Image (cartoon, helix red, strand yellow):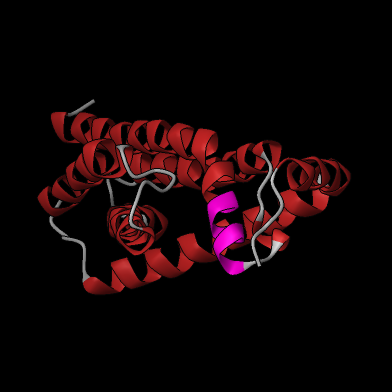
């Protein structure tokens, strides 16, 4: 294996590892953030259960993992890998913006700039080093892909876990009713 192949594999594995660490934080904290959002919006429909959060993140992991494998195999040339790398880098800004808008901590805020951003920047540097730097179109495709995939992951997990979700929402509402 050449050093170029090795560095591409390291960058792809680092991107996946950064995503994994970041999404562990999200899995643990997203239900609380969804509760804060539901309270502010006055609707229980926005509540995300812990099991739903974990399943949705696992589904996203399939996409991110597949993209990283493709990136390693194609030396960073895969359109899927380029889109996911650029999209994850841009995703960091959404965490910061959400926390500014909420004026406090939201799910993923700690690891987004400290772990996800360096992982995405390493992937970006390796892609640039391979001779075809990421373009704004990669970021646009990546943002659209990741947003659509996250939405689909949450819808699928909500559907698959619907009876458990109903029980969790009922118990949560009894503990702390939403403000009107």
Q: Quadrant of the N terminus?
A: top left
The residue segment tinted magenta is 34-41
Q: Residue at x 50, y 38 (%)?
A: 29
Residue 62 seen in render: no
Horizontally, residue 170 falls left or right of residue 143, namely right
Q: Establish if 146 lies above or below 26.
A: below
Depicted 141 relative to depicted 59: above or below: below
Q: Nearer the viewer, residue 99 or 59?
A: 99
Please say whether residue 57 is one of the residues in the magenta stretch: no
Locate residue 13, reporting x and y percent.
Answer: 33, 32
> Which image quadrant: the C terminus?
bottom right
Residue 44's quadrant in the figure? bottom right
The answer to which of 85 and 108 lies nearer the viewer is 108
* Residue 71 location (% of width, % of height): 35, 45
Q: Quadrant of residue 80?
A: bottom left
**Residue at position x 28%, y 59% from top?**
93
């Amino acid at each position: 294996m050449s050093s170029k192949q090795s560095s591409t594999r390291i960058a792809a594995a680092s991107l996946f590892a950064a995503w994994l660490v970041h999404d562990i934080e999200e899995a643990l904290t997203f239900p609380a953030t969804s509760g804060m959002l539901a309270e502010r919006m006055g609707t229980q429909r926005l509540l995300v259960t812990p099991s739903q959060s974990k399943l949705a993140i696992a589904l996203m992991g399939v996409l991110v993992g597949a993209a990283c494998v493709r990136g390693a195999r194609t030396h960073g040339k895969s359109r899927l890998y380029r889109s996911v790398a650029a999209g994850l880098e841009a995703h960091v800004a959404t965490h910061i913006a959400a926390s500014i808008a909420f004026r406090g901590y939201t799910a993923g805020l700690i690891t987004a700039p400290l772990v996800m951003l360096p992982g995405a920047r390493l992937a970006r540097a390796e892609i640039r080093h391979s001779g075809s730097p990421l373009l704004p179109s990669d970021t646009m495709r990546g943002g659209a892909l990741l947003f659509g995939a996250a939405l689909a992951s949450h819808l699928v997990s909500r559907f698959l876990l619907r009876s458990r979700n109903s029980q969790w929402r009922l118990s949560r509402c009894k503990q702390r009713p939403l403000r009107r």
